[in-house]
Image (cartoon, grey):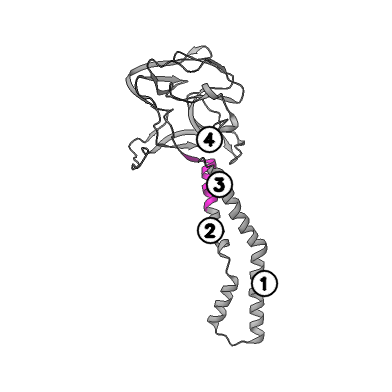
Amino acid sequence: MNIDFSLVLVCLVGFCGALWLFDILLLKKGRDKAVTDYQHQHKQRNKGKSDDQVREELESLAQEPVVIEYAKSFFPVLLLVLALRSFLVEPFQIPTGSMIPSLLVGDFVLVNKYAYGLRLPVLGTRFVEVDDPKRGEVMVFIHPQEGRYYIKRVVGLPGDTVHYEDKILTINGELVSLELEGNITVSTQIGDLPGTLHSENLAGIEHPIQHINGLGSRRTRTTWIIPGGQYFMMGDNRDNSFDSREWGTVPEENIVGKAIAVWMHKEPGFNLPTFAYNKWIN
């Protein structure tokens, strides 16, 4: 089940805030009036109640409803979480192997939410411009068709011409630097296959990528011209990544933030988390 936590937080903050405001504007006035009336009646009738009894009855009349108490308690906490998650950092867990070897399945990453500008929660509208995505950076975004969070590497910027054929990447007619690091075994859905590990340099950002030997491209298209306000995304697991080569470019309004660090890792299943893989993301 895909849950939009930003939407959930916005709804909870709005609900708690509305209850608190309702209490200030209406309910609290009724409680204050009840306390005033009781004090006036007690003085006139002199019922002979002890001070402790009077105090208890006054406290009961002034007591807030339980739902209002909870709303007032949760509102500042939820508002702080929403602000941190929307404008500073947001946690994200790697769900698939499309970014192997840079990021592993089960990695927990921190996403810098202000690197590409401040955006309204849920709507994604940028209201403060900070910077634009750079080629080679790892970006979290909302898939343009599925509406889910994805994480890939920025390969094509607005106006670029991207060509990818026979495992060779060129951008605007220039060959992207690629150095062979060695032979590896790549895990796939059909089993382990022989592959190669490479070091790629995208605009000065060096990072590892991997290829699967002998696996031909399943894609017929090889060239893409990136429209304005759009970004072309690819996974570092080049032969096993569902990315812009299949579904197209990512619009600017779908950007979530820049992935900056791995802060925890947990293997799928009943395994304890570990901090042994913590690192900054290139």
Dot 3 and dot 2 residues touching (CB under 8 Å): no
Location of residue 10 in the rendering, given as x and y in whole percent from the top left corner: 58, 47
- Residue 142: image quadrant is top right
Location of residue 41 in the rendering, given as x and y in whole percent from the top left corner: 66, 82
Q: Indicate the secondary structure of the residue bearing disc 1.
A: helix
Going from the N terminus, do you reach mark 4 or mark 2 first?
Answer: 2
Dot 1 and dot 2 residues touching (CB under 8 Å): no
Q: Amino acid at mark 4?
A: Arg
Q: Eyeballing the image, is 267 above or below 191?
A: below
Let me know if residue 239 appears in the view. Answer: yes
Q: Indicate the secondary structure of the residue bearing disc 3.
A: helix
Location of residue 39 in the rendering, given as x and y in whole percent from the top left corner: 64, 79
Dot 3 and dot 4 residues touching (CB under 8 Å): no
Q: Which residue is tagged 2?
A: 73
Going from the N terminus, do you reach mark 3 or mark 2 first?
Answer: 3
Quarter that holds the C terminus: top left
Q: Which residue is tagged 4?
A: 148
Write the start and end of the magenta stretch as one range: 77-91
Q: Which residue is tagged 1?
A: 33
From mark 3 to mark 2, how far is it between C-alphas?
18 Å
- Prevalent SS, magenta region: helix
Location of residue 186 in the rendering, given as x and y in whole percent from the top left corner: 35, 24
Q: Which residue is tagged 3?
A: 8
Q: Eyeballing the image, is 256 above or below 22?
A: above
Q: Eyeballing the image, is 273 above or below 204?
A: below
Frontmost residue, 96 versus 17? 96
From mark 1 to mark 3, how far is it between C-alphas?
36 Å
Q: Amino acid at mark 1?
A: Lys
Q: Amino acid at mark 2?
A: Ser
